[in-house]
């Protein structure tokens, strides 16, 4: 072969080699480029969220509390902070209130003339006109407390004479002092009753002497709770007796006071019946429940008090403490696709006081989790019993960390 032929053959071989080399180089570049994109995508992609496996605690409910109910009259029992009534009978029947009206008188007067804590309030000067009121009440066979012309009592002392001794004469004298007349007092008192939602309560005077003063047991329980929220009244009705200047000692007409947990509120007596609006403190665990009730229409106060004592003794054990959640209780678990595990635990425990067979339920609300540090809140446990509701945070007991490069590169189908 001549030299030119050799040179042409070598050129052809060289060109073929260049094509092969550059083609291979292009393939390598393409592979590297594609791999780089995949790697970048894999390393930057969001990892899938781990769904919680939730544990819902079973509802807790005690057996229903048996009650010793009165076999007469109209009655209702409620508790401060609890919805509805725990016991009731003929509770919507209008009945004569008698001296329970004096609680309304005290509340309406104190709204107009509040007494600061630890003080006696404004002075009230008593005159011959107040002595005349006294004798007029005696003539009508009303309950009275002594009064002396020329004497001066503070408003608190005057209220003690009205509420402890059930002095009907003081209800009139106080109303005259506070509003100018009993009629003006009644105008305000009727408006006050309407404002408080006591829709079945009708007022005819300030003392309860008239049988036209009527209400229902349901309204009276609400009235009792309003009265206990007024510190001056709450203190007075829990007092066995008070020494008043120029009058002497007045004693509380509530013979149940200091027994069966009773710490108030007011007696009421008509020619035909005995009434008691009562309150009692019921210890439950480390706290207590204030029970407010009324029994209207007893034959006499002895029969009435016996029935109320039995009712209170049966009501008290029905309040009990329930602890549906403990601190650090596991309520949800997480397992990630790359094998990490963590649990959602309660940050606090939860306990509450319930009545009788009121069910206590726990709702667990846990969120899906991707990456999270230990201690992060991932949900809430909501405890419900009647109208009571407690929310407890759920927190992770371990971190959920990124799965790392190898898992990301080897699990392309698991990445978003």
Image: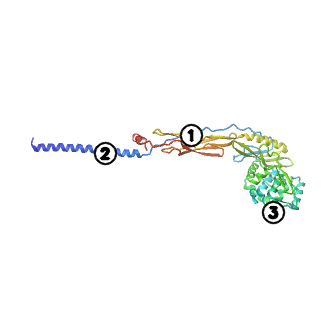
Position in image of residue 203 (x %, y %): 80, 55
Q: Are marks 1 and 2 in contact (CB under 8 Å)?
A: no
**What's the coloring here?**
rainbow
Q: Earlier in the sequence, mark 3 or mark 2?
A: 2
Q: Are marks 1 and 3 in contact (CB under 8 Å)?
A: no
Number of the label disc, if any, that sits on residue 331? 1
Q: Is residue 305 left or right of residue 40?
A: right
Number of the label disc, if any, that sits on residue 30? 2
Q: Is residue 358 left or right of residue 20?
A: right
Taking 343 as reference, is 96 above or below it? below
Position in image of residue 11 (x %, y %): 16, 44
Tell me the element at label 1.
strand
How far is the residue under mark 1 from the one under mark 2?
51 Å
Tell me the element at label 3.
loop
| Residue 330 falls in image quadrant | top right
Q: Earlier in the sequence, mark 1 or mark 2?
A: 2
How far is the residue under mark 3 from the one under mark 2?
103 Å
């Amino acid at each position: 072969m001549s030299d030119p032929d050799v040179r042409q053959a070598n050129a052809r071989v060289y060109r073929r080699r260049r094509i092969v080399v550059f083609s291979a180089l292009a393939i390598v570049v393409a592979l590297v480029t594609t791999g780089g994109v995949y790697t970048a995508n894999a390393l930057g992609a969001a990892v899938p969220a781990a769904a919680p496996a939730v544990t819902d605690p079973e509802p807790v409910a005690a057996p229903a509390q048996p009650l010793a109910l009165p076999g007469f009259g109209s009655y209702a029992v409620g508790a401060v902070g609890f919805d509805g009534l725990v016991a009731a009978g003929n509770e919507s029947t209008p009945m004569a209130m008698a001296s329970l009206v004096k609680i309304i008188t005290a509340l309406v007067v104190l709204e107009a003339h509040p007494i600061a804590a630890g003080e006696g309030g404004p002075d009230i000067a008593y005159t011959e006109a107040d002595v005349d009121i006294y004798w007029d009440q005696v003539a009508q066979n009303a309950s009275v407390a002594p009064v002396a012309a020329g004497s001066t009592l503070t408003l608190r002392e005057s209220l003690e004479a009205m509420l402890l001794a059930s002095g009907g004469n003081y209800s009139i004298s106080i109303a005259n002092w506070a509003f100018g007349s009993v009629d003006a007092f009644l105008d305000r008192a009727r408006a006050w009753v309407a404002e408080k939602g006591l829709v079945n309560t009708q007022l005819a005077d300030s003392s309860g002497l008239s049988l036209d003063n009527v209400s229902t047991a349901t309204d009276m329980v609400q009235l009792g709770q309003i009265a206990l929220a007024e510190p001056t009244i709450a203190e007075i009705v829990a007092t066995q007796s008070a020494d008043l200047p120029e009058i002497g000692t007045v004693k509380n007409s509530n013979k149940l006071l200091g027994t069966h947990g009773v710490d108030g509120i007011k007696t009421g007596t008509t020619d035909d019946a005995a009434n008691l609006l009562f309150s009692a403190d019921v210890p439950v665990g480390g706290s207590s429940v204030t029970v407010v009730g009324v029994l209207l229409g007893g034959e006499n106060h002895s029969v009435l008090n016996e029935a109320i004592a039995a009712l209170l003794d049966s009501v008290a054990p029905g309040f009990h403490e329930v602890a549906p959640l403990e601190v650090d209780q596991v309520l949800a678990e997480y397992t990630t696709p790359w094998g990490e595990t963590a649990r959602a635990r309660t940050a606090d425990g939860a306990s509450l006081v319930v009545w009788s067979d009121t069910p206590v339920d726990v709702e667990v609300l846990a969120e899906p989790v991707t990456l999270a540090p230990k201690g992060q809140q991932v949900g809430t446990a909501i405890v419900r019993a009647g109208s009571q509701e407690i929310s407890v945070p759920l927190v992770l007991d371990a971190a959920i960390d990124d799965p790392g490069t190898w898992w990301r590169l080897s699990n392309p189908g698991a990445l978003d």
